[in-house]
Amino acid sequence: MFSKNKIKFKIILCLMIFFAISSLAIFAFSAETATIDEQLEQLENILDSSSNYSDFQKNQMLLPNLKDLLISGIPFESTKEIIENSVEKSLDAYNIKKVFDVILETQQEGLPTEPLINKLNEGLAKDVNNNEIISVISTKAENLKKANEILNEALQEGLEINGEEEMVEILSDSLENDVPQESLFWLLKTGTTEGKSMEEISEISEELSYLSLLAYDSGLSLEEISLLFKKAIDNSINTEDMCENIQNSLETEVSTAKIEGGGEKPSTSTGSTITPTTTSSGETPIISGETPTQEAGEAPTETGSAPEPSTSPTEESSSPPEN
């Protein structure tokens, strides 16, 4: 009899614990839902402060997307900042939704979204064209995916890499500067095998970005840059050799072009400076300081600098006729 009562007591105790845990879970879920609803109300008030968005755009396009962002784990402050900047700069509702879709997809794939949000806010602050903002953010998202592929490939080979999310951002920045994907995988694999720290790998990655931009500015195409990097890395035993070999290969390439072409290889920005922020693969880097050359035979376009005529009309008329 005693053992039966003991068993009943244990069953009742387990049931009580189960109901207590269930109640706490339901309460926590309800509290979270209430919090999200309160946050959405604040975001809705920000949208209402602008007359640029119709009821349809606010209620059926933007607010549902905002809720998805919050539920997916995007911080409220980041989401609020996006809406505030978008309203201030009168960003079109359809473009806002495109941005949200890219950020949400990136978040759902487990990739860092902060670089995308930073790019968006930077573009809005600089009054960049809406379509260009969408293009830059979409390209950044693609580079994050490619960087994650590089990381996963390294992990599949048994490499132990600390700070995976930070490493994805480092690789993504180099991809943005047109460093070949294969070169970054080699760097990650070789650097990790050598026991390089994340800071050291980041420094080498930045140097590769610099060399890629230097090669592009020297007139090499993206295909030529990729081949140059591959040849240099194939001849590298370690990461210390890599950057030096790329630099030597670049110098050889430029020198050969000068000899074969009878002059310097056409450059995309002779005598110019490439800005630190460059566009993604396939796009021309932002270049400043170019001076357009004037073709022979064209009239000068600057005012006040017209050449003097070789013989004035009065001088011609003053010559006496020959007898």
Image (spheres, rainbow, N blue to C red):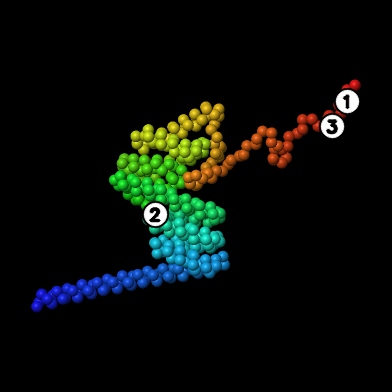
**Looking at the rendering, which quadrant does residue 73 occupy?**
bottom left
Quickly name the residue at label 1. 320
Quickly name the residue at label 3. 314
Counting residues from the N terminus, which is met first, the one under dot 1 or under dot 2?
2
> What is the distance, in whole Å, between disc 3 and disc 2 at their CAs?
79 Å
Q: Is residue 216 left or right of residue 300?
A: left
> What is the distance, in whole Å, between disc 1 and disc 3 at their CAs?
12 Å
Q: Residue at x 54, y 54 (%)?
A: 131
Tell me if mark 1 has few (under 14), some (14-19) or many (20+) residues whose alpha carbon lies within 10 angstroms of its own. few
Quickly name the residue at label 2. 111
Please report contact status of discs 3 and 2: CB closer than 8 Å, yes or no.
no
- Residue 120 placement (x, y as % from top left): 49, 56
| Disc 1 element | loop
Q: Report the residue that reaches farthest toward the top.
A: 323
Q: Residue at x 19, y 75 (%)?
A: 12
Tell me if mark 2 has few (under 14), some (14-19) or many (20+) residues whose alpha carbon lies within 10 angstroms of its own. some
- Residue 171 placement (x, y as % from top left): 40, 46
Counting residues from the N terminus, which is met first, the one under dot 3 or under dot 2?
2
| Disc 3 element | helix
Q: Visible in this render: residue 169?
A: no
**Looking at the rendering, which quadrant does residue 309 occupy?**
top right
